[in-house]
Image (cartoon, coloured by chain):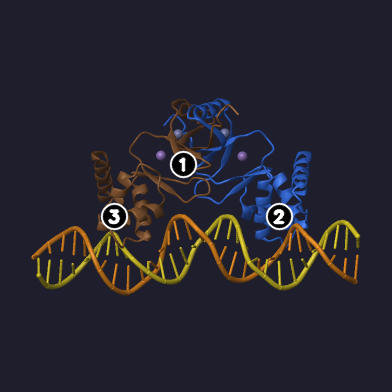
Chain colours: A blue, B brown, C yellow, D orange
Amino acid sequence: MTNAQQRAEHFTQALRAAGVRITRQRAALLDVLAEAEDHPDAVELHRRSKDRAPGISLSTVYRTLTALEEQGVIQRHQFEGASARFEHADGEHHDHMIDVETGDVIEFCSDRIERLQAEIAREMGYDIVHHRMELYVRRRSNGKA
Amino acid sequence: MTNAQQRAEHFTQALRAAGVRITRQRAALLDVLAEAEDHPDAVELHRRSKDRAPGISLSTVYRTLTALEEQGVIQRHQFEGASARFEHADGEHHDHMIDVETGDVIEFCSDRIERLQAEIAREMGYDIVHHRMELYVRRRSNGKA
DNA sequence: AGGCTTTTTGCAAACCATTCGCAACAGGAT
DNA sequence: ATCCTGTTGCGAATGGTTTGCAAAAAGCCT
Ligand SMILES: [Mn+2]
Ligand SMILES: [Mn+2]
Ligand SMILES: [Zn+2]
Ligand SMILES: [Zn+2]
């Protein structure tokens, strides 16, 4: 997982650049975030971080998440009826499908949709600052009865 | 405004069908919702309803909004960093652009995007239950310096 | 109208995710 | 060691929304 270490390093740099100290607690959370391949919420991140930094508080998790988001290195997603979920923001832009039965989050991206969005905004005299597109889905019922 | 009266009637029917009594307070809110051409939040709806039903409480507004949403006759939108906003759900489906400077909400709809969304979900083995697409935008800077 | 049953109301309190205030604390520079 | 400044954990506050409850209103039957 050199990839995760790279990300952790990236987070560290971003915070340092913003004059933020890398404490034991923050280092732990940074590693957890860097390794996460899913979309955990603050409580889950706190749970995972406690292994590496016993005693870390949920407040610290929230504070650090806010700092990371301000630096643009992680993203916060507010899906329907759930607490905020987080993920690292290094890869390509993507949007999400949420399986309404299982809660699973699936990533996807459509260049054509992205282009159409920009086009529509432009036609109406606007530029897109950012957007949010979430498909709440259900596994396809298997054709045959 | 026969259009609004029609909508109010529609709301009334929907609630009645669900075994909900149309009280003075609810009638007031129904009218307010039916007449609204914007995307007011609960507090604003409460404010507007107080004219027609003095003493109506915010709790009643929330309770009735929930009932109307359950009947599918109004929609609740949770835009970024704001309280829930409501609108009647009779017209065609549409999505929203939010002007990040002014907070203005602009409606739009793209059949092409809607089709692409369905196509993407299908390809991944899902059916869309519902979706959410919000463009956070800024007025286009006027070309010339 | 009167009486009975069910729903609704307004109020205050509870919720819940997130933020904030603060006094104790840690890190680094001198 | 000593300053200085940023950070911590705790508990309390926040704010939109929901809920428990006793009193009031609506519907219903006669
Ligand atoms: Mn993602
Ligand atoms: Mn709308
Ligand atoms: Zn996108
Ligand atoms: Zn749409």
Lower sequence index among marks 1 and 3: 3
Judged from this view, the residue extending furthest toward the front is B145
Q: Residues within 10 Å of mark 1 (few under 14, many from 20)?
A: some
In this rendering, the label closer to the viewer, 1 or 2: 1
Q: Is mark 2 within 8 Å of ligand 1?
A: no
Q: Give x and y (percent) for residue A47.
A: 66, 56
Residue at 74% across, 48% down: A18
- Report the Cα–Cα distance between label 1 and label 3: 28 Å
Nearest to the eye among marks 1 and 3: give it: 1
Q: Which quadrant holds residue B62? A: bottom left
A77 left or right, relative to C7: right
Instruction: Estimate the spatial distance between the alpha carbons at disc 1 and disc 2, rounded to whole Å.
Output: 40 Å
Q: Which mark is residue B26?
A: 3
Identify residue type, mark 3: Arg
Residue on which the image places disc 1: B104
Which one is in front in this view, the residue at disc 2 or the one at disc 3? 3
Q: Which mark is residue A125?
A: none
- When the figure is inspected, residue B61 is found, relative to residue A94, above or below; the finding is below
Which is nearer the eye, A131 or B69? A131
Residue A144 location, x and y as percent? 43, 29
User: Could you classify mark 3 by the number of other residues whose Cα lies within 10 Å: few (under 14), some (14-19), or many (20 or more)?
Assistant: many
In this view, A56 is above or below B36: below
Left or right of residue A136: residue B6:
left
Chain of the residue where label 3 is placed in the rendered structure: B
Q: Position of residue C2 (x, y in %)?
A: 12, 72
Residue type, mark 2 in image: Ser
Is label 2 in a helix, a strand or a loop?
helix
Give the residue number, with chain letter if any, for mark 2: A49
B30 or B40, which lies in front?
Answer: B40
Q: Is residue A76 above or below residue B126?
A: below
User: Are circles 1 and 2 on residues that touch, CB within 8 Å?
Assistant: no
- Quarter where residue A75 is shown: top right
